[in-house]
Amino acid sequence: MDFCRLLHLGLLAFNALAIRSLSAVSGGHKSIFSKKENAQAALLVASQKTLPVMVAVVQQLGGAFGESGLLVLPCVAAHLIQIVLDSFLANFWLRKELSSNTAKVA
């Protein structure tokens, strides 16, 4: 598993735990984070931090592996792929929620 995927999964796990903690601390079931759709949106948005981290890592390399500008290009591509995959994930969650709500009504 490459660094980008590992970082993304790590951020998702950390942010999921942080959102649950915020929900518990800020009022439990009355918290804005207790609503599933709000928690999912916050989780995805909070986990979109890989591009700044990757750019910072490339800058710290100081050109050891080549031009920093060229090394950032794969980072940008990986970030765009991450956004696309997250949009599929959000769509999957929404469809799953809609189908479960439809089944409850019927």
Image: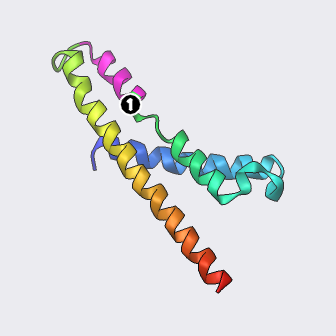
- The amino acid type, in three-letter code, at marker 1 is Leu
How many numbered circles are shown? Answer: 1
Residue 83 at least partly seen: yes
Above or below for 32 versus 66:
below
Is residue 100 rendered to the left or right of residue 9?
right
Query: Horizontal and vertical percent for residue 106?
Result: 64, 87
Q: Which residue is mark 1?
A: 51
Query: Horizontal and vertical percent for residue 73?
Result: 23, 27
Above or below for 9 versus 59:
below
- Tell me where residue 74 sits by quadrant: top left
Query: Horizontal and vertical percent for residue 23?
Result: 74, 51
Residue 40 on the magenta segment: no
Label 1 neighbourhood size at 10 Å, few (<14), some (14-19), many (20+)? some
Residue 6 at least partly seen: no
What are the residue bounds of the magenta stretch?
52-62
From the image, give the main secondary structure of the stretch colored magenta.
helix
Above or below for 21 versus 50:
below
Which residue occupies 39% across, 43% down? Answer: 83
Is residue 20 rendered to the left or right of residue 90?
right
* Element assignment for label 1: helix
Residue with the most extreme left position: 66
